[in-house]
């Protein structure tokens, strides 16, 4: 009986040994096949064992005796040593998955790999007697994560941080509370016109140029692109408000200079809104104040900056109120059209009248175009307003008296870029003329230089179609926008209207007078009629006539007048200023 029990015990021992051997063989097979690198290191952080997969990850599996820390990039060795010490000093069972980190390793074949490191202290295990370090190759994963993070926080066009990144930094700066923090919002004034006229590629190039100027001018402060044509600068925790103001001045000056692209000289000034923590306690409040200041800067005119103060809210509220009321004004017929005569400079005989829209506001009186046309463009109302002005002017012109035998004054109507580019504009003009039975020769459409900035087949074909109908085309405010002299040889035009800035400076500058004389001579050589705008004195009229301008417009002859007064002004008895 005792012998039988002994034999049974021996068989059980042999079975346990066999099970253990199979288990160890299976474990070894798993280690051999694992893609992760498994290392066992001693008390001196030297490698006692490296799994075969080390050859793939590190370019060699002959690592016995090598220092693990020496394989780590020099910038991370201190942290690597700390991790290994931490793994030995921490109860492994208390840490889910052991101690973890990311390391950059230099492989034997020169590659740099990023690995996720997991450490577990198994020095008490009789079969291990060391710290097990597992290395998982996460190079591509981390590269992808970095790219996704970059895309999340970076603007792909300019390379600047985006709005999300900027807003986070604003919150961090305010939380630090180590001084005055300022936010400057930068909005490009006429970017929409450039984008529409020259195309997206040119618009993108302008944005990249502006981004570079802002970054170079901001003096190390964070610069970001926070919208389509809107940028921002964060002056975090500076000594005082005056430093933020200095940044605003530098940014305004930097963007005042022209931008050159594809042979064109473009003007892209900016409005800047400034707010500081002197008036705001939270990031949300600071950003809101900067927005209000930006609206105030826009209302003040192009190429300027404004810092937030309590009165800013009033100015912005006024602008928002006008935007809301303008749509209703169009429905309520609160818009009116006035007319300013255009006369021959030699005889004083009236040749035509320019239609000028006004808004009869219920509480603020009559508003000039400069007070609401910009709002109309921003809100998309400029096209219906322009169409209404065109229809009104054509209808009113029917009642004007002839200024001579068979000679009737023409009506000149301004057309915005948005209106001209709207679908069916030429057909709309043709329909309005046909319905009113006004001869096409009595209509002049005034366009701006920005409409002609790119080779747009639709624009050029529409210009030709309008002239084929008998309608004359004028370019308004000539000389203020772009290098338009080259266009005069190509664009189907009839009239050039010299901007008032030329006329006002000719009297005091001989050089300016000769410049304008050259422009006038060129336009007349091309068969174009020249109208001098803004003539206010007899001296300006005489100079304009002497250099070759055939016609003039300005307060010297008449201020804008109502339709009823225009009828009387066109009558032969009062239609001449001889």
Image: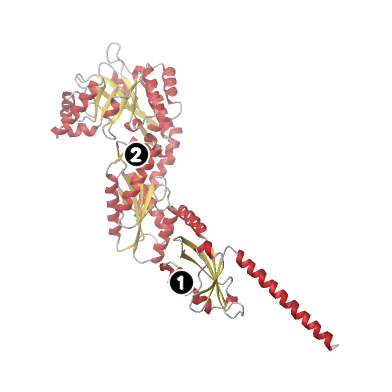
Q: Give residue 371's mark.
A: 2
Q: Is 184 drawn above or below residue 429 in the view shown? A: below
User: Residue at position x 44%, y 61% from top?
Assistant: 110
The C terminus lies in quadrant: top left
- Tell which tag, 1 or 2, sits nearer the viewer: 1
Secondary structure category for the residue under label 1: helix
Badge 1 or badge 2: first in the primary sequence: 1
In the image, taking residue 10 as reference, residue 440 lies left or right, namely: left
Q: Give residue 69's mark.
A: 1
Q: How crowded is mark 1: few (under 14 residues within 10 Å), some or many (20 or more)?
A: many
Looking at the picture, how far across and down is residue 242, in whole percent? 27, 59
In the image, 430 versus 393, the foreground residue is 430
User: Residue at position x 41%, y 16% from top?
Assistant: 437
Secondary structure category for the residue under label 2: helix
Looking at the picture, how far across and down is residue 459, in whole percent? 39, 27
In the image, 37 versus 415, the foreground residue is 37
Looking at the picture, how far across and down is residue 154, in whole percent? 43, 52
Number of numbered discs present? 2
Marks 1 and 2, how far apart at CA: 70 Å
Q: How crowded is mark 2: few (under 14 residues within 10 Å), some or many (20 or more)?
A: some
User: Residue at position x 66%, y 72% from top?
Assistant: 24
In the image, 109 versus 273, the foreground residue is 109
Looking at the picture, how far across and down is residue 145, in whole percent? 50, 57
Question: Residue placed farthest to the right in the image?
Answer: 1
In the image, 31 versus 61, the foreground residue is 61
Q: Can residue 408 be seen in this view?
A: yes
Q: Is 249 drawn above or below residue 490 in the view shown? A: below
The N terminus lies in quadrant: bottom right
């Amino acid at each position: 009986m005792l012998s039988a029990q002994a034999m049974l015990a021996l068989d059980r021992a042999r079975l346990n040994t066999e099970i253990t051997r199979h288990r160890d063989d299976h474990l070894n097979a798993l280690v051999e096949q694992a893609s992760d690198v498994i290392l066992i290191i001693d008390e001196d952080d030297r490698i006692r064992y490296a799994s075969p997969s080390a050859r793939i990850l590190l370019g060699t599996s002959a690592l016995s005796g090598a220092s693990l820390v020496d394989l780590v990039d020099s910038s991370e060795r201190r942290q690597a040593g700390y991790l290994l010490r931490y793994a030995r000093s921490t109860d492994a069972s208390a840490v889910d998955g052991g101690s973890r980190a990311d390391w950059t390793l230099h492989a034997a074949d020169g590659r740099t790999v990023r690995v996720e490191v997991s450490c577990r202290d198994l020095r008490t295990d009789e079969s291990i007697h060391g710290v097990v370090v597992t290395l998982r190759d996460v190079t591509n994963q981390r590269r992808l994560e970095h790219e996704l993070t970059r895309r999340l926080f970076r603007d792909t066009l300019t390379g600047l941080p985006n709005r999300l990144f900027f807003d986070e930094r604003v919150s961090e700066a305010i939380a630090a509370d180590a001084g005055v923090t300022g936010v400057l919002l930068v909005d490009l004034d006429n970017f929409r016109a450039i984008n529409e006229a020259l195309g997206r590629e040119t618009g993108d190039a302008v944005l990249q140029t502006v981004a570079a100027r802002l970054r170079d001018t901001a003096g190390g402060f964070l610069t970001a692109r926070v919208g389509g044509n809107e940028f921002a600068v964060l002056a975090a925790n500076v000594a005082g408000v005056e430093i933020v103001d200095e940044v605003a001045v530098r940014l305004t000056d930097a963007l005042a200079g022209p931008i050159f692209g594809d042979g064109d000289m473009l003007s892209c000034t900016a409005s800047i809104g400034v707010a500081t923590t002197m008036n705001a306690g939270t990031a949300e409040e600071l950003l809101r104040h900067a927005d209000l200041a930006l609206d105030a800067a826009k209302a003040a005119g192009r190429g300027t900056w404004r810092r937030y103060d309590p009165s800013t809210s009033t100015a912005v509220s006024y602008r928002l109120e006008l935007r809301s009321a303008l749509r209703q004004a169009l429905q309520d017929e609160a818009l009116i059209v006035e007319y300013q005569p255009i006369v021959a400079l030699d005889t004083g005989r009236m040749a035509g009248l320019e239609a000028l829209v006004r808004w009869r506001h219920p509480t603020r009186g009559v508003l000039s175009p400069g007070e609401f046309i910009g709002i109309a463009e921003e809100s998309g109302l400029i096209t219906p307003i322009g169409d209404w002005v065109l229809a009104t002017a054509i209808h009113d012109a029917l009642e004007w008296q002839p200024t001579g035998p068979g000679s009737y004054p023409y009506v000149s109507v301004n057309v915005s870029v948005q209106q001209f580019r709207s679908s069916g504009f030429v057909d709309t003009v043709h329909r309005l003329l046909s319905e009113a039975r006004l001869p096409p020769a009595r209509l002049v459409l005034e366009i701006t230089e920005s409409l002609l900035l790119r080779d747009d087949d639709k624009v050029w074909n529409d210009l030709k179609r309008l002239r084929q109908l008998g309608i004359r085309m004028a370019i308004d405010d000539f000389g203020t926008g772009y290098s338009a002299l080259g266009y005069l040889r190509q664009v189907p035009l009839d009239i050039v209207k010299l901007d008032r800035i030329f006329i006002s400076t000719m009297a005091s500058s001989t050089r300016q007078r000769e410049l304008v004389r050259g422009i006038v001579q060129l336009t007349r050589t091309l068969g174009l009629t020249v109208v001098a705008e803004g003539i206010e004195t007899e001296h300006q009229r005489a100079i304009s006539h002497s250099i070759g301008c055939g016609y003039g417009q300005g307060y010297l002859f008449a201020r804008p007048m109502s339709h009823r007064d225009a009828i009387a002004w066109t009558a032969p008895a009062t239609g001449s200023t001889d």
